[in-house]
Image: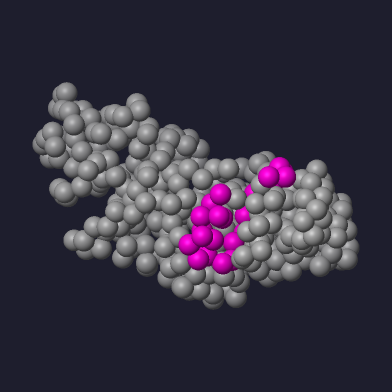
Amino acid sequence: MTISLETPCVLIDTEIMARNIATMAERVQQHGVQLRPHAKTHKLPVVAHQQIDAGAVGITVAKVSEAEVMAAHGIMNIFIAYPLVTASKIERAIRLSEEIELLVGVDSLAGAKLMEQTAAKHGHMLQVRLEIDTGLRRTGVPYEAAEALALEIAGMPHLRLTGIYTFRGALLAGKPTLDVAAAGLEEGQLMARLADRLRAAGIAIADVSVGSTPTALYAAAVPGVTEVRPGTYVYQDRMQAQLGVCGLGDSAGSVLVTVVSRPSADLAIIDGGSKTFATDVQPGTHPLQLRGFGHIHGLEDALLVRMTEEHGMIELGPSAQAADLKVGDQLRIIPNHICSTINLHNHVVMQRGDTFERLPVLARGMLE
């Protein structure tokens, strides 16, 4: 396929994207829970609007700056699923919550105290959710310490504790797994049990928010879960296909690259390297055991095996060599991880059949 586009660039097939949005919304609705997609994948208000139009209650973001971009473009219900621990960020969240329905994350007493002090100074009430560590060992209060912290937060007059949330990914009994059904079930049960325990202690927990793309639908089936927050599903990627969540044909996002050099019969060099493709999902790691940094359309035994900043090295097997790639030929590659790849690009190209529209990724690089 040769397209008149400057490469490297990210292509988004809008038909596949729309199908992914509709499918997730329909399946979540069947479980009677709310869908709050994570916008980290697309970072585009126009896509967030499509998700909400399909039935999502709002969106999830990681940073205040992402929330500000989304709110400025008409997204009116946002959850910042990340602990805010500086007065400046809390003040920005307060200003934002005066304009939209805003929820913010907290996972420590120190963070909660600062949030309470800052909200009190402004005479404002903030809606908060307590983040729980269910095994990933990232942010989140340790599971066994959640009740004590929740009681402290519930007693703060300028914080309204509305629920609990977790991010766990494809983890089962504390270890990475390909059994996403069991992982989602375990995640949902852990959180539903904790919510019951907190309610028994007198804390009015309304929201139990869980679920990444691989586990969302399985966690959503657990009684007591009220919300799921998948993100990658909107575009899908090679990692999700390897987890069995989707097929490669469900990947709306791919990277268009150009062959810039053919040093030998078994090697092609493309114009996309580590500044084009995310490298956070490495080949050969448990449990995915991916080969290379992406799936190359139409060349089954070609592997993107190595990258420097601006170069990608593709090893060509016998059938790929028979394809007789030439300098100037273009390839489409589904990256291992689309979310981190999107954040490397200022623009994406929306493909509607033979029509292409270049859109700025408005929340790209919004990390503060």
Horizontal side of residue 230 vs 163, given as left or right: left
Residue 90, magenta (yes or no): no
Quadrant occupied by the C terminus: top right
Res 198 quadrant in image? bottom right
Judge left or right: residue 293 versus residue 328: right
In this view of the protein, can residue 211 be seen by the observer? yes
Image quadrant where residue 367 sits = top right
The residue located at (66%, 64%) in the rendering is 98
Front residue of this view, candidates 148 and 113: 113
Q: Residue at x 20, y 38 (%)?
A: 258
In the image, 193: left or right of 44?
A: right
Q: Please name whichever residue, 336 or 151, is drawn nearer the observer in this view of the structure.
A: 151
User: Which sits in the foreground, 236 or 108?
Assistant: 108
Q: How many marks?
A: 0
How far from the left and from the top, in percent, is residue 15? Answer: 31, 65
Residue 361 location, x and y as percent?
Answer: 40, 51
Name the residue at 56% across, 67% down: 76
Name, please, the residue furthest toward the top.
263
Query: Quick check: 274 above or below 193?
Result: above
Residue 31 % position (x, y): 58, 73
Q: Is residue 244 visible?
A: no
Q: Residue at x 69, y 63 (%)?
A: 208
Specify whether residue 82 is painted magenta: yes
Residue interval drawn in magenta = 65-88
Residue 86 higher or lower than 102, as above or below: above
Q: Is residue 95 left or right of residue 347?
A: right
